Image (spheres, helix red, strand yellow):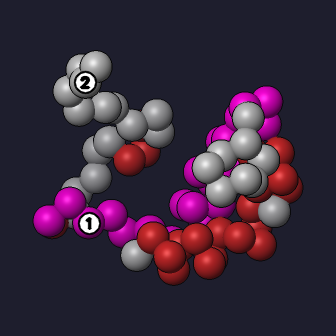
Amino acid sequence: MDDGPRRSQCPELEDHDCDDDQLLLDSEFVCDLVLQLDPYKSLGPGGNHPRNLKGLADVIAKPLCSALV
């Protein structure tokens, strides 16, 4: 059942002033988003546990930023 467009769980992503729906991401912003993950949630589709991602936030932020741009 589709209830229409989903709202982001991250309010920082809601109000952006970018043209063509492009977000300007930097590694610090991505690191902050990773640190907001709930460590008590289950594994993601990639098999990575949020607790591990939070522990490696400073290491994975730059590669994630590059992958998302």
Relative to the observer, which residue lies in front, 17 or 44?
44
Which quarter of the rendered picture does the N terminus lie within?
top left
Relative to the observer, which residue lies in front, 41 or 10?
41
- Residue 34: image location, x then y, percent: 65, 52
- Residue 59: image location, x then y, percent: 77, 72
Can residue 58 be seen from the camera position used here? yes
Q: Where is residue 57, by image quadrant?
A: bottom right
Q: CA distance from mark 2 to mark 1?
A: 25 Å
Helix, strand or loop status at disc 2:
loop
Question: Which amino acid, by three-letter code, is at mark 1?
Answer: Gln
Q: Where is residue 56, by image quadrant?
A: bottom right
Going from N to C along the chain, the mark reached first, 2 or 1, is 2
User: Most extreme residue toward the left, as rendered?
Assistant: 20
Residue at the (83%, 53%) spot, across then down: 52
- Residue 54: image location, x then y, percent: 78, 51
Please give left or right for residue 13 compared with residue 19 in the image. right
Please give left or right for residue 2 compared with residue 48 in the image. left
Q: Which residues are magenta?
A: 20-41
Question: Which amino acid, by three-letter code, is at mark 2?
Answer: Asp
Residue position for label 2: 2
The numbered mark at residue 22 is: 1
